[in-house]
Image (cartoon, rainbow, N blue to C red):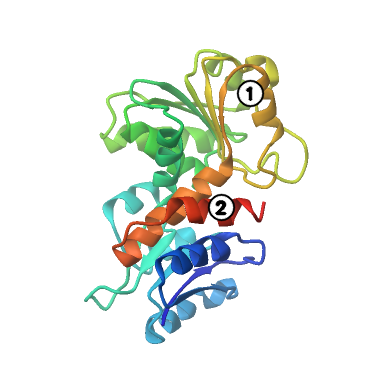
């Protein structure tokens, strides 16, 4: 039996187990997906233990994505983003390989809804792990990215990394949340990469800024219909809930681990049945 899993702290809320196990059931795989919750000071030991026990692959979530970067052989894209959320123990090397599939979750979510970031003006709200993944994904696909963050200096640091990266033909810009007033009305794509809207009926983007020529992805998936998405829909915008991003980062991880095409519809149904 193959064993996959998720390591983080906390992980009790995760919807990854039913999503991945639906894929195993659909393909008749003898596999299970297990959650692990080590203390922060035991994370490195947990990875060593997973390797020793023959675990095939792990997803990594808060607060370990940056720690994982230092403990695995990270691929160049994960290095650029500065975080690892998928670890593969199946290689020949003594050090497991690390990847970031969060960016692919963003890209595939937009593609699923026929939204192309190429040539778009994009606004990313948040400069944390999800914001970094979204910003690099959009920049790599040809968007001009503006990063807005409560702490403007963090947004500026991310924009500088995008500009120093040399992979985008556009210059990234940055500002605090007040900069949304000038960036969102002219934007084609908007990503909320903060947790605003998860614990309360709040939105990081004032409703009057939203418009019908906008595609809005909210990384928050619980609840699936956030205030931001409701107000964006009322403005005529294309809306994409965070479950799509969660789904596709899991799809890419599954395909990385197994070399098989993921049963996307079955994974999506299992995920949404738990929302």
Which label number is shown at residue 269?
Answer: 2
Quarter of image, res 3: bottom left
Provide residue 132's location: percent of width, then percent of height. Answer: 45, 42
Which residue corresponds to the image point at 31% horizontal and 61% vertical from the top-left? 260
Provide residue 239's location: percent of width, then percent of height. Answer: 57, 29
Reply above or below: 192 against 97: above
Foreground residue among 11 and 245 = 245
Q: Answer yes or no: do the residues labelled 2 and 1 have beta carbons within 8 Å?
A: no
Looking at the image, can residue 242 be seen? yes
Q: Residue furthest right?
A: 200
Looking at the image, can residue 204 be seen? no
Q: Secondary structure at mark 2?
A: helix
Provide residue 265's location: percent of width, then percent of height. Answer: 47, 50
Which residue corresponds to the image point at 38% horizontal and 57% vertical from the top-left? 262
- Looking at the rendered structure, the number of numbered marks drawn on it comes to 2
Instruction: Please name the residue that numbered disc 1 is placed on.
Output: 232
Provide residue 102's location: percent of width, then percent of height. Answer: 44, 49
Foreground residue among 191 and 64 = 191
Foreground residue among 8 and 31 = 31
Q: Residue furthest left?
A: 92
Which residue corresponds to the image point at 38% horizontal and 86% vertical from the top-left? 52
Question: Mark 2 to mark 1: distance in Å?
Answer: 25 Å
Reply above or below: 140 against 57: above
Q: Quadrant of the N terminus?
A: bottom left
Which residue corresponds to the image point at 32% horizontal and 71% vertical from the top-left? 96
Reply above or below: 140 against 21: above
Foreground residue among 260 and 232 = 260
| 190 lies left or right of 261 | right
Q: Secondary structure at mark 1?
A: helix
């Amino acid at each position: 039996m193959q064993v996959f899993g998720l390591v983080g702290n906390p992980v009790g809320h995760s919807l990854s187990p039913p999503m991945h196990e639906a894929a195993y059931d659909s393909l008749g795989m003898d596999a299970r997906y297990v959650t692990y919750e080590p203390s922060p000071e035991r994370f490195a030991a947990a990875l060593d233990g997973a390797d020793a026990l023959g675990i095939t692959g792990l997803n990594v979530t808060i607060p370990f994505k940056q720690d994982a970067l230092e403990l695995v052989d990270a691929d160049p894209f994960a290095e650029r983003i500065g975080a690892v959320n998928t670890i593969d123990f199946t290689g020949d090397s003594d050090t497991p390989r690390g990847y970031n599939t969060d960016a692919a979750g963003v890209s595939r979510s937009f593609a699923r809804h026929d939204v192309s970031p190429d040539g778009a003006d994009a606004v990313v709200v948040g400069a944390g792990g999800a914001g970094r993944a979204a910003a690099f994904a959009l920049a790599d696909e040809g968007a001009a990215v503006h990063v807005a963050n409560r702490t403007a200096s963090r947004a500026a640091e991310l924009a500088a990394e995008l500009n120093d990266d040399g992979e985008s033909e556009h210059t990234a810009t940055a500002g605090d949340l007040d900069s949304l007033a000038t960036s969102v009305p002219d934007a084609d794509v908007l990503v909320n990469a903060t947790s605003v809207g998860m614990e309360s009926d709040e939105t990081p983007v004032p409703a009057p800024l939203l418009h019908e020529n906008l595609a809005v992805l909210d990384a928050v998936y619980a609840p699936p219909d956030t205030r931001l998405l409701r107000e964006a829909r009322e403005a005529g915008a294309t809306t994409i809930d965070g479950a799509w991003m969660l789904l596709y980062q899991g799809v890419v991880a599954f395909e990385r681990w197994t070399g098989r095409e993921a049963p996307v519809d079955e994974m999506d149904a299992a995920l949404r049945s738990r929302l």
